[in-house]
Image (cartoon, helix red, strand yellow):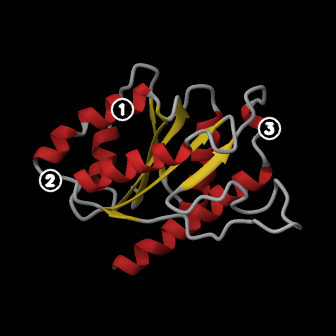
Amino acid sequence: MTDIAIVYHSGYGHTQRVAQAVAEGANAAVIAIDADGNLPEGGWETLAAAKLIVFGAPTYMGAPSWQFKKFADASSKVWFVQGWKDKLFAGFTNSATMNGDKFATIAYFWQLAMQHGGLWAGLGIVPSNKKESSRDSLNYVGGFGGLMTTSPADASPAEIPAGDLQTARAFGERLQGALKLLA
């Protein structure tokens, strides 16, 4: 059992690849929300045991996928008994454009964490916003409140920019370190 659990939905595989990179950096358990918006067997128990929960979903039409929202609604049973109170939370999203209203998805995750009485961990990596920066630089997309990545609409999951995957791993490492601050 790990102290960090990543619960995510991925429609086309891009968000799954980002989840895997975050998990590599964080040594985290990964829980995929299926196409019907349900967790696999043992998913709720893994989240209950985790000290840090990471939310992940693609940004579709300026918000997380409906499958993630179904999971969020189902978490009201946990909310009712304050089962996630004082846990640490974080989040990530992916969309096809550089902006794509990704921050609205991060804000959704933050609000969900606050509803559960949680604490929030942001990205903690300054953006690569200088002339020498490239698409493969860390945090090129420029997130602060959470990890934001971009996959062109015609790109396969294998074509996610290397800098975004490196940023995802670094985010996972930051989250692993954040747990030590709570100990």
Q: Amino acid at mark 2?
A: Gln
Q: What residue would you read off at disc 2?
A: 82
Residue at (56% x, 26% y) in the render: 11
Residue at (54% x, 36% y) in the render: 59
Report the number of numbered marks: 3
- Lateral position of residue 143 relative to residue 65, left or right: right
Query: The C terminus is located in which quarter?
Result: bottom left
Q: What residue would you read off at disc 1?
A: 69
Q: Earlier in the sequence, mark 1 or mark 3?
A: 1
Label 1, label 2: how far apart the Cα atoms are:
19 Å
In front: 171, or 113?
A: 113
Q: In the rendered image of this protein, does residue 54 appear above or below residue 62?
A: below
Q: Residue furthest right?
A: 132
Q: Position of residue 161 (x, y in %)?
A: 78, 46
Q: Earlier in the sequence, mark 1 or mark 2?
A: 1
Q: What residue would you read off at disc 3?
A: 159
Query: The N terminus is located in which quarter?
Result: bottom left
Q: Position of residue 88 (x, y in %)?
A: 35, 63
Q: Are marks 2 and 3 in contact (CB under 8 Å)?
A: no
Question: Would residue 41 be seen by someone viewing this image from the given angle?
Answer: no
Q: Amino acid at mark 3?
A: Glu
Q: Are marks 1 and 3 in contact (CB under 8 Å)?
A: no
- Lateral position of residue 74 relative to residue 167, left or right: left
Q: Position of residue 100 (x, y in %)?
A: 61, 38
